[in-house]
Amino acid sequence: MGAIEIALAIEMVTDGLSRRQWLCLVVPALADEGCAGASVVIYNPDLDPDHRVAADVVARLSEAFNRASRTTLQ
């Protein structure tokens, strides 16, 4: 079977997905046994001078990977 790529474009602004919505999309994808990896692209630090968005991205990814690992271990 060939590789399948699922891209989730998440715009971390007021019009973007809530943390709960984002986790509902990402956790099942990460927990799936067919998930071979993940990547984060197009972060522009010039648009985040106080690094608030960067901290949110890291927190969301950490939570998603933690939840996905607990899901796959059960």
Image (tube, rainbow, N blue to C red):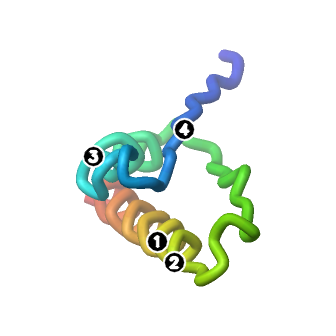
Give the residue at mark 1: 56
Left of 24 or right of it: where is 4? Answer: right
Which tag is nearer the camera, tag 3 or tag 2? 2
Q: Which residue is rendered at x = 42% and y = 66% of the image?
A: 60
Q: Total of numbered circles in the picture? A: 4
Q: CA distance from mark 4 to mark 1?
A: 15 Å
Mark 3 nearby-residue class (10 Å; few <14, some 14–19, many ≥20): few
**In the image, what residue type sits under mark 1?**
Asp
Q: Which residue is rendered at x = 50% and y = 44% of the image?
A: 10
**In the image, what residue type sits under mark 2?**
Arg
Q: CA distance from mark 3 to mark 1?
A: 14 Å
Q: CA distance from mark 3 to mark 4?
A: 13 Å
Could you say which quadrant of the image residue 43 lies in? bottom right
Q: Quadrant of the C terminus?
A: bottom left
Give the residue at mark 3: 21
Name the mark on residue 9.
4
Q: Which residue in the rendered view is the most extreme toward the bottom? A: 50
Left of 12 or right of it: where is 41? Answer: right
- Tag 4 near tag 2, CB within 8 Å: no
Mark 3 or mark 4, earlier in chain: 4
Mark 3 or mark 1, earlier in chain: 3
Name the mark on residue 52.
2
Of residues 70 and 57, the one nearer the viewer is 57
**In the image, what residue type sits under mark 4?**
Ala
- Tag 1 near tag 2, CB within 8 Å: yes
Q: CA distance from mark 1 to mark 2?
A: 6 Å
Mark 3 or mark 2, earlier in chain: 3
Q: CA distance from mark 4 to mark 2?
A: 19 Å
Q: Which residue is rendered at x = 27% and y = 46% of the image?
A: 21
Per the image, label 3 sits on a secondary structure element best described as: helix
**In the image, what residue type sits under mark 3?**
Gln
Left of 21 or right of it: where is 27? Answer: right
